[in-house]
Amino acid sequence: MKVVVLRDRGSTLAVVFILIFMAAFMAPLVYMFLSAAGGTLFLVLFIAFALLIFGGGLYGVIRVRSASKKAEAFFSAAEFSDSAVSLPGEMDFEVGVLEMRGWWSGGKNRTYHVSRKFTAERMSRGSRIPFIDGEFKAAVYSDGTGFIRAPAVRVLSEPYRDVVLLFLTSKGRVEGEGTVTVSTQEDSAQVSFRGDGKLIRGSVYSTLTKARRVKVALTTEGFSFEKILGTGTSFEFSALMLPEESTVVVGNYKTVSPKSLAGSLGGGTLVMGHGEFTLRAILDIRLRPDVKAEEPFVVELEMEEAEKSEENEFEEEWGFT
C-alpha cells in the first residue's frame, strides 16, 4: 500500500509581498502624514491598517502550516500496512465520504477556492482502521480545478483532530468497448477502444483534408473537463484508470484540496476512479469549431467473495458495523 502525506506549507508569497509593500511605501507615507495637519492621527490609523493586513496574511500561513504539521505528526505516529492503518492509541473517528471541488476566480490576481463536504456514515472508536475498498472518483486539472469524491475517515480525538484519511483503492476493472466515429464532409476518424484490466486502450485511424489532427480525450460527468490522451492522425493510446497500488492519502480536513492531492499524485491532470467515464473523439479544424463524438465506458469495483467476507468480518471486529 502506498501512503501519501499532503505537506501544504501555505504560500508565503502574500506575506512577502505585504512586507515589500510596507517597506517601499511606509517611509514616504510616514513623511507625508507627519507633514500634514493632524498627521499623527492619520499615521496611527495607517499603521493599524497595515498591521491588520499583515497579521491576516501571517495568520493564514500559520494556520495552514499548523494543519499540515498535524497531518505529518499523525503519519509519523501511525503504522500503515496493506490492509489497515494502526492508530497511535484508541481514538474516536467517523467514517464516510469526502467530496471536494476546487476552482479559481478573478483575473490576473486569481484566488483558489475549495468546497469540502464530509458525509459521515458511522462513528467508531478504536486503534485500527481497515483499508476501505470503496468506489472513488477524481477529475482534477494540474492547477487544482476539478473534484474528488472518495471514502474517508476523519479523526475526532486530540491531538490529531481533523486529520483526514482518503482511501483510493486499486481494485477494479475497465468494462466496455466500442468505436467512436467523428466526421464532416471532408474529414473522418474512427477511434476504437476497449477495457484492459485497469487500462482503457485504443487506436485511431483517420482521413483528414481540412482538419489538422484528431484528439482523443477522457471526460466524466458533472464537470466540464477533458484530459487529452493523444493527438495525431493515426496513433494508439492508453490511460490508467486506477492507481497502480492502493493508496492512503493523509491530510487535514481544513486544508486538503483537489490541488494538493493532484500535486501529490503526480502533478499533472488527474482522471481516475470508478463509475462512468466518456471517451471523446475530436476533429481539430483550423478556424472552425471542433467536431466531437463520444461513447461511455465504466470502471467497476470488483471484489472476490472471499475478500468481501473477510472485509465484513474485519469491520465487525473493529466496530465498523
Image (tube, rainbow, N blue to C red):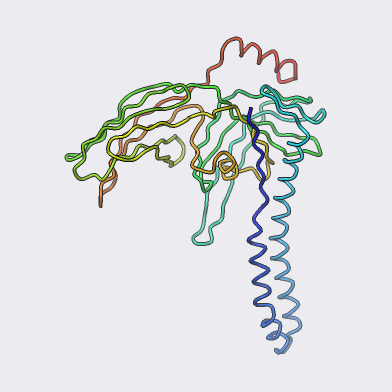
Q: Residue at x 71, y 89 (%)?
A: 35
Q: Residue furthest front?
A: 235
Left or right of 177 on screen, residue 159: right
Point out residue 244 in the picture as x, y percentages from the top left corner.
Answer: 54, 28
Q: Is residue 45 above or below residue 252?
A: below
| Image-quadrant location for residue 229 | top left
Tally of marks: 0
Point out residue 321 in the picture as x, y percentages from the top left corner.
Answer: 70, 18
Left or right of 150 on screen, residue 280: left
Point out residue 245 in the picture as x, y percentages from the top left corner.
Answer: 58, 27
| Image-quadrant location for residue 81 | top right
Q: Residue at x 67, y 83 (%)?
A: 28
Q: Residue furthest left?
A: 185
Left or right of 215 on screen, residue 173: right
Q: Residue at x 46, y 37 (%)?
A: 222
Quadrant of image for the N terminus: top right
| Image-quadrant location for residue 25 | bottom right
**Which of these two is toward me, 197 or 46?**
197
Point out residue 269 in the picture as x, y percentages from the top left corner.
Answer: 48, 42
**Which of these two is toward me, 243 or 120?**
243
